[in-house]
Every structure is written in structure tokens, then in C-alpha cells.
Amino acid sequence: MIDSDSVVYTLIHNQLVDKVCQKLEIQSILLAKEKLIRDYDEKLVRKTITHKILLNLTIKSHKKLTMSMLIADIEHHEAILSKF
């Protein structure tokens, strides 16, 4: 799934990103424009996304090179792979 075009965006929890950045020796990147988070029912919530990380992702035999992961408080999830 991650190596196909079906994954349009990914989110990573802001509490997990520090560990990931430290482990992979990467830094977060400031977005040119803030993004607002929409809930699953498409209602806007009062959270904005200001940073992202770029990394190569492998899940089992599936690979995605240079995946952009937006950093956000996504509550009970560590990461979300999704499609608009």
C-alpha cells in the first residue's frame, strides 16, 4: 500500500517525532504554509500542522522513498497513512 499511489498523506504524532528524528539523525522541516487538521467527519479542529519530516519508509516488503510525514497531535495514534 505505501509503495502505491493510494497513500496521499501521512501524519506522525508530535510526541513520537522527536524519537524518530533523533534515531534517524534527521530534522523536521518548517512548512511554507500552515495546514489545518480536519477530523474524520471533515469538521475543522483547532490544530494546525507547521512541520514535516522526510524519510524513506519500509513496511514488510513495501518501500516508499522520500515520504513526507506531517507532524501533528493525532491523539491515540502514532502514525496515520491515509488518502484524501
Image (cartoon, rainbow, N blue to C red):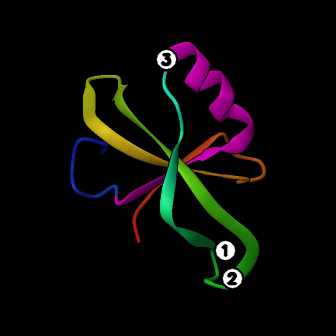
Chain-order first, disc 3 or disc 2: 3
Q: Which residues are magenta?
A: 8-25
Mark 1 vs mark 3, foreground winner is: 3
In which quarter of the view is residue 67 placed?
A: top left
Query: Residue 11 appears at what percent x and percent y?
Result: 55, 51
Q: Amino acid at mark 2?
A: Leu
Give the crowd class for mark 2: few <14, some 14-19, many >=20 residues within 10 Å: few
64 vs 62, nearest the viewer: 64
Viewport quadrant of the N terminus = top left
Chain-order first, disc 1 or disc 2: 1
In which quarter of the view is residue 62 placed?
A: top left
Callout 2: SS? strand
Residue on which disc 1 sits: 39
Position of 17 compared to 4: left or right? Answer: right
Callout 3: SS? helix
Query: Residue 31 appears at what percent x and percent y?
Result: 49, 58
Callout 1: SS? loop
Mark 3 vs mark 2, foreground winner is: 3
Q: Are marks 1 and 2 in contact (CB under 8 Å)?
A: yes
Chain-order first, disc 1 or disc 3: 3
Spatial CA distance of label 3 from label 2 is 32 Å
Residue 19 shows which numbered tag?
Answer: none
Position of 20 compared to 10: left or right? Answer: right
Residue on which disc 2 sits: 44
Q: Amino acid at mark 1?
A: Asp
Residue at the outermost bottom position: 43
Residue drawn at 34 percent across, 22 percent down: 60
17 vs 84, nearest the viewer: 17
Q: Amino acid at mark 3?
A: Leu
Name the magenta segment's main secondary structure. Answer: helix
Viewport quadrant of the C terminus = bottom left
